[in-house]
Amino acid sequence: MHELGIAESALKAAIVEMEKQKAIRILSLTLRIGELAAVDPQAMEFAFKTVTLGTPAEGATLEIDHVAPIAWCRDCSESFSTDSIAFFKCPRCGNYSGELKQGREIELARLELDS
Ligand SMILES: [Zn+2]
């Protein structure tokens, strides 16, 4: 379950930020997760609850911003949405492009801290 690893990294990043801002508690944490990142929201929620136990983020709310996949065509520079995980056909010129602009990211988007 890679959600556990993601939750751990997110928590680590959040705690670094919390200490930087001299806060004492993390109230909520928002992750930006691409729809192609293969993250299961329910597993993520569970993993987050598990890794935050006994930390300043215990009881914090986990929010997930889902990021729709957008591919990019190298030939004509068109950006387009896709629901495929590997082959992106450009709607403008019909070429296949393997470039994904967004949709696979896993990022810490926002933190709400309590000082
Ligand atoms: Zn194109």
Image (cartoon, rainbow, N blue to C red):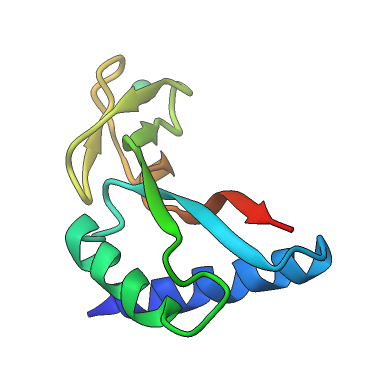
Q: Is residue 12 left or right of residue 3?
A: right
Dividing the picture into quarters, in which one does residue 81 lie? top left
Nearest the eye: 82 or 2: 2
Nearest the eye: 69 or 49: 49
Q: Is residue 17 above or below residue 107?
A: below
Q: Is residue 17 above or below residue 9?
A: above
Q: Is residue 90 left or right of residue 106?
A: left
Q: Is residue 17 left or right of residue 68?
A: right
Instruction: From the top left corner, tell me how far across and down residue 37 is, in percent.
Output: 31, 57
Nearest the eye: 6 or 97: 6
Q: From the image, which quarter does the C terminus lie in?
A: bottom right
Dividing the picture into quarters, in which one does residue 60 lie? bottom left
Across the whole image, how many numbered discs are drawn on residues? Answer: 0
Q: From the image, which quarter does the N terminus lie in?
A: bottom left
Q: Is residue 113 above or below residue 10?
A: above
Instruction: From the top left corner, tell me how far across and down residue 62 is, in percent.
Output: 39, 55
**Residue located 20% across and 67% down the image:** 43
**Residue located 27% across and 51% down the image:** 36
Q: Is residue 82 left or right of residue 80?
A: left
**Residue located 50% across and 54% down the image:** 29
**Residue located 58% across and 62% down the image:** 26
Q: Is residue 68 above or below residue 20?
A: above
Instruction: From the top left corner, tell me how far across and down residue 48 is, in percent.
Output: 36, 70
**Quadrant of the rendered image holding ligand 1:** top left
Residue farthest along the top direction in this orientation: 92
Nearest the eye: 63 or 91: 63
